[in-house]
Amino acid sequence: MEFIDYYKILGITKKATEAEIKKAYRKLARKYHPDLNPDDKSAEKKFKEINEANEVLSNPENRKKYDEYGKNWKHAEQFEKAKQQQGSRQSQQRGFTGGGFSEGDFSDFFESMFGGARSSGRQRSGGVKFKGQDFNAELHLNLQDVYETQKQVLTVNNKNIRLTIPAGIQNGQVIKIRGKGGPGVNGGPNGDLFIKFSIKNTTKFRREGNNLYTTVNLDLYTAILGGEINVDTFKGKVKLKVPSETQNGTKIKLKGKGFPVYKKENQFGDLIITYNIKTPINLTDKEKKLFEELQKLR
């Protein structure tokens, strides 16, 4: 078996911290996930390599063994005993570090983690339970989609997963579905499925937390004299009374007309409206004279 450079696979250096390893893994796992690259065998192979590298380097003890013994890291204890018995010269002749990386080759450790088997007939490490691989997915929705609770069926690794999406979920929010990742090894628990929500907003409302913000144009005459107007909320129209002498930039709050509060039934944020007073244009001569008269009165 050829030596596999796990650091190279994740695009990090040997000095990488645990946080840097985790960040690199998640980034690459999202990029090469089979669900995002259907029928792409090269992406599937790359995905396996990434997971293998992460399984080794994210475990401090395994990483230490790998750094010292390379492809033979799983047999570190045996090599230590051999070094003690036969001396440093013989241990150097064993060739603990290997040559270049081969894309078509995966280590015995990966096979033991993900259930594969080698033609060489080597046995898996007996009785050790491993949690299955965690899966990461990204679900794209529109803002309108998350105003109300909805159900969806996701297909992950050819398995349908029924998912309830609570109203009010945030853009970038990640939820975990326990046990919906890869199968465990040697009776270990299944991995988990992590779903990140990417929510696109094409509405005229700006969302901040549970509150919504919008701007409403108000004609000059209504702003001065007052009156009633109809304004859009995220769900239908409401009628508002505009006080006389309303100033440009005035903000009003419509309580409970914002976005649903995540996992809190019948609770909503507020809708904050900012008035934008529009100055009339293309005035007639008569209108100009009337404004001139008002100017004189003031």
Image (tube, rainbow, N blue to C red):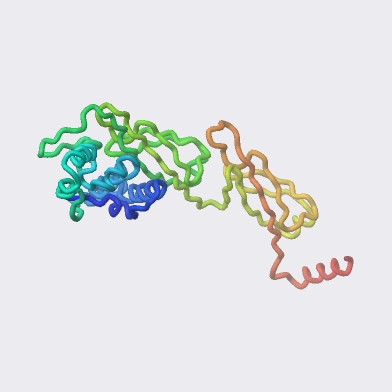
Residue shown at 40% from the left, 49% from the top: 17
Q: Residue 207: where, in percent of width, then height?
A: 57, 48
Q: Quadrant of the C terminus?
A: bottom right
Residue shown at 32% from the left, 55% from the top: 11
Q: Is residue 155 left or right of residue 76?
A: right
Residue shown at 49% from the left, 41% from the top: 146
Residue 109 is at least partly visible in this image: no
Q: State the residue in front, 180 or 200.
A: 180
Q: How many marks?
A: 0
Q: State the residue in front, 16 or 294.
A: 16
- Residue 129's place in the image compared with 58, above or below, is above
Identity of the residue furthest to the bottom in this view: 285
Which quarter of the picture shows residue 111? top left
Q: Is residue 85 left or right of residue 269?
A: left
Q: Residue 8: where, in percent of width, then height?
A: 28, 54
Residue shown at 20% from the left, 44% from the top: 72
Which quarter of the picture shows residue 122? top left
Which quarter of the picture shows residue 266? top right
Q: Is residue 98 left or right of residue 22?
A: left
Q: Residue 152: where, in percent of width, then height?
A: 39, 36
Q: Residue 38: where, in percent of width, then height?
A: 26, 47
